[in-house]
Image: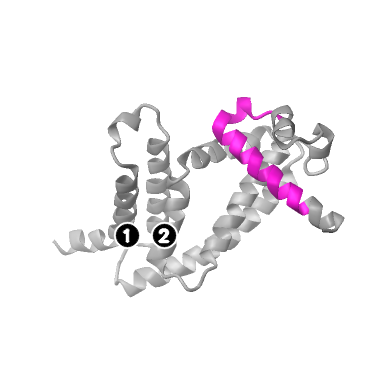
Amino acid sequence: MDRQAQFRAREVLIFQIAEQLLLENGEAGMTLDALAAELDLAKGTLYKHFQSKDELYMLLIIRNEKMLLEMIQDTEKAFPEHLAFFMLHHLHHPERTALFHQIEERLSTTGQGIQLLFSELYKIRRQRLRIIIRMTESYLVDIHSSMTTRDYLASIWSLTYGAAVILNSSFYQRYLGSRDTLRVAYIEQALAMPKQLEQVAAS
């Protein structure tokens, strides 16, 4: 393996372990010292891959966004499958969804030297949204729904993020019952929304 390939492989491992530590311990517990110790690397080696903890967080968020973009680019899947994949991505790891959202919001106002990374993040997100909008418009036409694309996508995101917050809530843990059953119920609700609108309009 050449040096460049070794660098890339090490970077992938760094991101995997950093995300794992972040999700297990929160921001307070995810120190660069702990990350270096977990990877058995010198702390200075980490700085070859990122310049600060804020930059590391942004790279993790961008990595997650790229994963979502790759998922939506699969043209073999129909809209309901894409919706299920999107929701399950968030609902199987609700702590990641909640934490990444909080970190992004904080870094957007307090982050230092990461403006270019925000530009990259927004570029990927816009690319994904263009695909999602076209796909959603086509789906709503196919099922003869009068629901607007904007309203449907906003409803899907609200339902998904709200579900992630509930699934990640220590208070609601005791009331949730089967998480898998709940995840399926959320997906079924998201798929039913544009059809329910037509039923209400017709009654």
Tell me if residue 45 is in the magenta stretch. no
Q: Which mark is residue 29?
A: none
Q: Residue at x 79, y 38 (%)?
A: 46
Q: Residue at x 84, y 34 (%)?
A: 44
Toward the left, the furthest residue is 203
Q: Residue at x 19, y 58 (%)?
A: 200
The percent coordinates of residue 130 (x first, y second) are 54, 64
Q: Give yes or no for contact between labels 2 and 1 (Cβ–Cβ under 8 Å).
A: yes
- Label 2 to label 1, Cα distance in Å? 8 Å
According to the image, label 2 marks what residue? 83
Q: What's drawn in magenta, residue-wise?
A: 8-31
The percent coordinates of residue 87 (x first, y second) are 42, 52
Q: Residues within 10 Å of mark 1 (few under 14, many from 20)?
A: some
According to the image, label 1 marks what residue? 191
Is 167 located above or below residue 66 in the figure?
above
Quarter of the image holding residue 40? top right
Task: Say which of 117 and 61 sits in front.
Answer: 61
The percent coordinates of residue 116 (x first, y second) are 74, 48
Residue type beneath disc 2: Leu
Q: Is residue 151 left or right of residue 203?
A: right
N-terminal-most mark, 2 or 1? 2
**Majority SS type along the magenta span:** helix
Q: Quadrant of the N terminus?
A: bottom right
| SS state under label 1 | helix
The percent coordinates of residue 178 (x first, y second) are 30, 41
Task: Say which of 9 and 202 sits in front.
Answer: 9
Q: Quadrant of the C terminus?
A: bottom left
Residue type beneath disc 1: Leu
Is 157 located above or below residue 131 in the figure?
above
Quarter of the image holding residue 5? bottom right
Task: Say which of 107 and 15 sits in front.
Answer: 15
